[in-house]
Amino acid sequence: MTRWVILTAPPAEDADGRLAAFASAASANPGVAHCSAGVDLPGSAGGLGALWDLTTESTPSAVLPGLPGDADLVPLAPVHARVVRLDAPRRVKRTLLLTVREGTSPDTVSRFESDLMAMPAHIPAIRSWSLSRVPGYARWTHVWEQEFADPDGLNGDYLLHPYHWTHVDRWFDAEIPGSIVDPAIAHLYRWADGPVLGN
């Protein structure tokens, strides 16, 4: 099984309802372990308007035949993940797609990954999380995913936390010496009606 995140444009009408129906139909495919989708919430940036999470033994085009041709299909090679139970089924799924600049040393990349994976120990609002690499892919090198109980957990507790600003933002800020992440990122979040990470 391979996990994928897929960026697409949302349907023109009743986007959330049509995406949910499409994902539910795909989940009935015996080659699909998990499929969910939703419209990017306001505050998302760098995406196409909707995000899919898919776990399949096949390819996205084989199990989601209605995907538009310009969909960004991103295969994930997990580095590490942790699943934490949420009492309420509904949650916010956040996906950050990023590119570490070519030529960055493996030791530096390892320190960067360690700083990302240390975030949940400092920021309790992060529930389930996963860090993946995207080997052999032209646009992105890493995908950093989290689940939150609500948008405030992401936009407040996470993005404004001192650990974020002192240990993680330095890797992204081009004005700080030693930054390694290309400025063109995709910061996307949506509602999910059940667990996404761990499926």
Image (cartoon, rainbow, N blue to C red):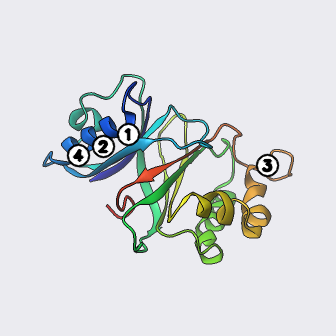
Q: Are marks 1 and 2 in contact (CB under 8 Å)?
A: yes
Q: Which mark is residue 137?
A: none
For marks 3 and 2, give the CA distance.
36 Å
**Can you give x and y, in whole percent of width and height, for residue 126 in the image?**
55, 68
Which of pointers 3 and 4 indicates the residue nearer the eye?
A: 4
> How many numbered tags mark residues here?
4
Residue 113 seen in this snapshot: yes
**Can you give x and y, in whole percent of width and height, for residue 116 in the image?**
62, 63
Q: Are marks 1 and 3 in contact (CB under 8 Å)?
A: no
- Determine which residue is flagged by label 4: 24
- Determine which residue is flagged by label 3: 173
Mark nearer the N terminus (1 vs 4): 1
Which of pointers 1 and 4 indicates the residue nearer the eye?
A: 1
Q: Are marks 3 and 2 in contact (CB under 8 Å)?
A: no
Q: Residues within 10 Å of mark 2 (few under 14, many from 20)?
A: some
**Can you give x and y, in whole percent of width and height, for residue 54 in the image?**
32, 47
Q: Residues within 10 Å of mark 1 (few under 14, many from 20)?
A: some
Instruction: Identify the residue at image location x=30%, y=43%.
Output: 20
- Determine which residue is flagged by label 1: 16
Label 2 amino acid? Answer: Ala
Q: Which mark is residue 20?
A: 2
